[in-house]
Image (cartoon, helix red, strand yellow):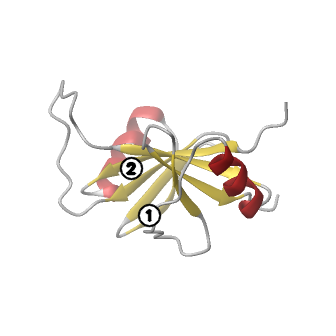
């Protein structure tokens, strides 16, 4: 079977991306590879973890089975249009709100969890 996409990174929603990146940098020993006001990222060349600011972020109340989304997957694809079409055929849907414009696509899996399909960077 040919895969539609590959895992690009894991993203955590938070109130302070820089502070959370610094924390995980210290915990995991991964360098901080990107830092700006609303987004930060750590990575070791293979695994990447992103931290995105969400206005009004509230941490989960552990354990809280009714908590809302706290993370999402980013997937790399060689052809964004084809990957989106194949994911939709498998049961995903495309919400109206697309914060990346045409740079990436936000889709919802069949259970309603958001994930992003991003163009694979040139190596």
Q: Quadrant of residue 116?
A: bottom right
When the figure is inspected, residue 39 is found, relative to residue 26, above or below; the finding is below
SS of the residue at dot 1?
strand
Q: Is residue 39 above or below residue 8?
A: below
Q: Where is residue 33 in the image (x, y as percent from the top left)?
A: 54, 56
In the displayed structure image, the side of residue 95 where residue 92 appears, left or right: right
User: Measured along the vertical axis of the image, is residue 75 above or below residue 64?
Assistant: below
Q: Which residue is drawn at 60% across and 65% down?
A: 104
Marks 1/2: CA–CA distance? 8 Å
Q: Quadrant of residue 52?
A: bottom left
Which residue occupies 56% across, 47% down? 92
Query: Badge 1: few (under 14), some or many (20 or more) residues near its Cα, within 10 Å?
Result: some
Please, what secondary structure does the residue beneath circle 2 have?
A: helix
Q: Do the residues labelled 1 and 2 touch (CB within 8 Å)?
A: yes
Q: Name the residue under label 1.
A: 35
Q: Which residue is drawn at 20% across and 33% down?
A: 66
Q: Viewer-proximal residue, 122 or 84? A: 84
**Residue at left offset 17%, top offset 27%:** 62
| N-term mark: 1 or 2 | 2
**In the rendered image, which residue does mark 2 sit on?**
21
Badge 2 local density, few (<14 within 10 Å), some, or many (20+)? many
Q: Residue 73 carries which label?
A: none
**Does residue 31 appear in the picture of this structure?**
no
If the image is split into quadrants, where does the N terminus sit?
top right
Q: Is residue 22 left or right of residue 77?
A: left
Seen from the viewer's position, the closer of residues 19 and 115 is: 115
Instruction: Please provide percent x and percent y for residue 41.
Output: 48, 54
Q: Position of residue 39 (x, y in %)?
A: 41, 63
| Residue at the top extreme of this rendering | 63
């Amino acid at each position: 079977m040919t895969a539609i996409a590959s895992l690009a990174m894991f993203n955590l929603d938070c109130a302070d991306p820089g502070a959370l990146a610094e924390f995980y940098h210290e915990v995991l020993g991964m360098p901080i590879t990107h830092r700006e006001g609303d987004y930060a990222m750590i990575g070791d060349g293979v695994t990447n973890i992103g931290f995105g600011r969400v206005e009004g972020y509230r941490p989960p109340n552990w354990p809280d089975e009714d908590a809302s989304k706290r993370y999402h997957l980013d997937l790399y694809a060689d052809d964004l249009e084809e990957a989106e079409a194949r994911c939709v055929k498998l049961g995903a849907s495309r919400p109206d709100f697309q914060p990346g414009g045409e740079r990436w696509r936000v889709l919802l899996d069949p259970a309603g969890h958001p994930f992003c399909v991003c163009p694979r960077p040139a190596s």
